[in-house]
């Protein structure tokens, strides 16, 4: 499918789509591909890893046969964007049992906290080659 890690995100979520735009802007080496969980590729990836794409509680990163989720996914993204964003890798010293509950609260309440788009976010034409 893709040699690059694939970030599967919620394109209806204002926070999630802003994060996707941020990644497209600061991923200068084009390390990541992105896929909306509302799209064919994103839905298939959620299902492949036993998750419900219509009611996800996390974004996922598919890196080969491995899936990264919850706070580990956020740390993985930012630690691979280069400086100064790589500094986020420091959060990996915080144990997951402390990070993940905070992540899940935000993820479950993302529409209420940040809003929901009426339509999926559409990337700029120059970024389309990075979207699956």
Image: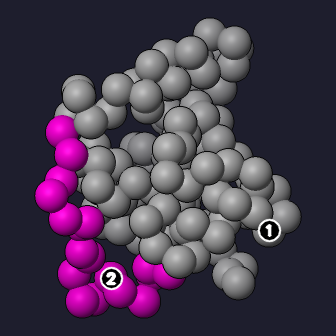
Q: What residue is at 65 percent from the left and 70 percent from the top?
A: 44
Q: For the N terminus, which image quadrant?
A: bottom right
Residue 108 shown left or right of residue 1 in the figure: left
Decide whether residue 129 is among the magenta residues: yes
How many residues crowd mark 1 within 10 Å: few (<14), some (14–19), many (20+)? few
Residue 127 is labelled as: 2
Residue 125 shown left or right of residue 71 in the figure: left
| Residue 83 visible in image | yes
Which region is colored magenta?
Answer: 115-132
Query: Distance of mark 1 from mark 2, alpha carbons?
Result: 22 Å
Q: Residue 45, relative to residue 22: is it above or below?
A: below
Q: For residue 45, what is the image quadrant?
A: bottom right
The disc, 1 or 2, on the residue closer to the chain's N-terminal end is 1
Q: Position of residue 33 (x, y in %)?
A: 53, 73
| Residue 77 visible in image | no
Q: Residue 50, relative to residue 24: is it above or below?
A: above
Q: How many marks?
A: 2
Q: Secondary structure at mark 2?
A: helix
Q: Residue 66, relative to residue 121: is it above or below?
A: above
Colour approach in the figure? one colour
Q: For residue 72, what is the image quadrant?
A: top right
Residue 64 is labelled as: 1
Decide whether residue 45 is among the magenta residues: no
Q: Secondary structure at mark 1?
A: loop
Q: What residue is at 40 percent from the left and 54 percent from the top?
A: 10
How many residues crowd mark 2 within 10 Å: few (<14), some (14–19), many (20+)? some
Q: Residue 126, relative to residue 30: is it above or below?
A: below
20 or 53, which lies in front? 53
Q: Position of residue 77 (x, y in %)?
A: 54, 50
């Amino acid at each position: 499918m893709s040699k690059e890690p694939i970030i599967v995100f919620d394109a209806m979520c204002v926070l999630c789509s802003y994060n996707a735009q941020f990644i497209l802007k600061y991923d200068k080496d084009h390390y990541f591909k992105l896929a909306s969980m509302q799209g064919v590729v994103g839905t298939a990836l959620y299902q492949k890893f036993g998750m419900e794409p219509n009611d996800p509680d996390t974004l996922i990163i598919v890196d080969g046969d491995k899936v990264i989720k919850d706070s580990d996914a956020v740390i993985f993204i930012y630690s691979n964007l280069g400086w100064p964003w790589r500094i986020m890798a420091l959060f990996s010293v915080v144990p997951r049992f402390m990070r993940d509950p905070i992540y899940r609260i935000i993820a479950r309440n993302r529409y209420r906290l940040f809003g929901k788009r009426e339509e999926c976010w559409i990337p700029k034409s120059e970024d389309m080659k990075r979207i699956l």
